[in-house]
Amino acid sequence: MTGTVDPTVLNLIVFVLAVFVGYHVIWNVTPALHTPLMSVTNAISSVIIVGAILAAGPVELDFGSVTGAVAVGLAAVNVAGGFLVTRRMLEMFRKKEKAK
Amino acid sequence: MSANLVALWYLVASVCFILALKGLSSPTTARRGNAFGIAGMSIAVLTTLAVVAKGRIDLILMAMLVGGTIGAYVSRRVEMTQMPELVAAMHSLVGMAAVLIAVAVVNNPQSFGLPARIPPGNKLELFIGTFVGALTFSGSVIAFGKLAGLGKKFRLFSSAPVVFPGQHLVNLALALVMIGFGSAFFLSPEQAWTPFLLMMTIAFVLGVLIIIPIGGADMPVVISMLNSYSGWAAAGIGFSLNNSMLIVAGSLVGSSGAILSYIMCKAMNRSFISVILGGFGAAEGSAAKGGADKTVRSGSAEDAAYLMANAENVIIVPGYGLAVARAQHAVKEMAAKLAAKGVNVRYAIHPVAGRMPGHMNVLLAEAEVPYDQVFEMEDINGDFGTADVALVLGANDVVNPLAHEKGSAIYGMPILEVARARTVLVNKRSMASGYAGLDNPLFYMDKTMMVFGDAKKVVDDIVKGLD
């Protein structure tokens, strides 16, 4: 065994561990909150906005950076919409807590 | 910022995302979880902006502003009954963004810190990310159309399954061709636009084809499945960019969607494969066979009010019919009136009540029903035996005792045991059968009283009857 580990292998390690974490965390989510779970996971998967920002980054405006900018816009809809609608739903679950 | 520092900030963001999901284990910690999610996202975006600080920040900020404004506006205006549509629409955006990023990577790998000739490993992952993204996009568009009821205008969006002979063979053939072009892209040492774009196009078509045969009743599974796909698409892009934060976030979302699909399938006693193959629920809404020669006892809303006012324990079973009639607030009012008379009122929620996982809980929460009165199926099923009245509002298949009879189409499906209550009140618009197209013996039992009519009108009348 010599040399460094290929990035793809490192990625795979991260991936498998993250799936395990996801599996255990998600089973603990109370069924009453499954709809907020879907909207928040939607917002979280929009973290691909990071890739879109990198694509839109280069100084010279070309096909790639315009494509990236469009992707930034689409992902931003989700980031804002996803977190805000989740918050709106969770607020509804709070109101009654006070009313009790 | 050094590459190591960037990676460490991304690690912090990843941990925030895990904490965001962990918070959802209870309504009391859920808001803090959401705050963690927002924090994680802010860290991720700011770190990346610092990386491209010398580039077109103006362009990026403008795109973020436009997108963010639209998202914020929609999140305020959307009705809770429209959540399934909103979620489907958001999945399609994730899918499309993934595809666009992949296109940008093929166009100019160097702006992502990859070599000009993309290494084969990253190319393979790019292929996977692109096709899953494209599939998520077009599949979610169809799911959105079906949920938003656009079927009358465009047949592709029909909530009834759209089936044609040889459908599965066509899909299989297309999938193989797509994998062929994907492999050509992967194996080519060049940029290989042609196979890449062909593969992408086929994936878009395939996304449409795999969702059209799935009927309205299976939409909770479809939304969860597309949720999962959108996560895997993000993870695929993370692989191709060697970005571990994207991989972590994508895997969390991917496993979340997969688990929700599993829960939904189990609650409907359907196998995942049979949902995917589609065609179920084609006869939706047709009159139940042999229903006409059996007698049902029907009563008025006043009778129902009288029965419930004199009960000690009432369990309300809300179904999607309730949400369609927008009767949640009226139900809340009715429950409050009953509680004032000393009646113990609880709600029993079947996992597939509503059109997406947990939908009914949100609809009740919106109507300000206290969540400690709302119980999941496993927690309340044992209590129906001691309930004086079970009030079924706009639900059918989830209370059908045929699920206990071997040989019936829904045999084995977990149901709410309303038949054990002393008296069962069922509100429905007509005797039409539910999505499964089955007759429901519950309606013909001696202890059952049917209250026909629109759920909102009936509940309003019950409220009047309670005064």
Image (cartoon, coloured by chain):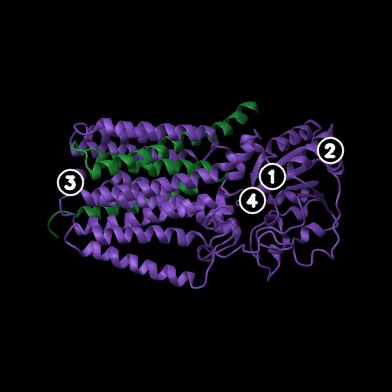
Chain colours: A green, B purple
Residue bearing mark 4: B350
Q: Which amino acid lies under the numbered mark 3 shown in the image of this protein?
A: Gln
Q: Which amino acid lies under the numbered mark 1 shown in the image of this protein?
A: Leu
Residue bearing mark 2: B309
Q: Which amino acid lies under the numbered mark 4 shown in the image of this protein?
A: His
Which secondary structure, mark 4? Answer: loop
On the image, the x and y values in percent for residue B155 come to 55, 58
- Mark 3 or mark 4, whichever is nearer to me: 3
Q: Residue at x 24, y 52 (%)?
A: A10
On the image, the x and y values in percent for residue B382 come to 70, 51
Which of the labelled discs sits on residue B322, or is there none?
A: 1
Q: Residue at x 14, y 60 (%)?
A: A1
Which of the labelled discs sits on residue B110, or is there none?
A: 3
Q: CA distance from mark 2 to mark 1?
A: 21 Å
Precedes in sequence: disc 2 or disc 4: 2
Q: CA distance from mark 2 to mark 3?
A: 72 Å
On the image, the x and y values in percent for residue B438 come to 70, 63
Q: Is residue B365 above or below residue B217?
A: above
Which secondary structure, mark 1? Answer: helix
Q: Is residue B103 above or below residue B438?
A: above
Q: Quadrant of the C terminus of chain B?
A: top right
Task: Evaluate if marks 2 and 1 touch, with contact meaning CB atoms under 8 Å apart.
Answer: no
Q: Residue at x 33, y 41 (%)?
A: A70
Q: Is residue A34 visible?
A: no
Q: Is residue A11 visible?
A: yes
Precedes in sequence: disc 2 or disc 3: 3
Precedes in sequence: disc 4 or disc 1: 1
Q: Quadrant of the N terminus of chain B?
A: top left
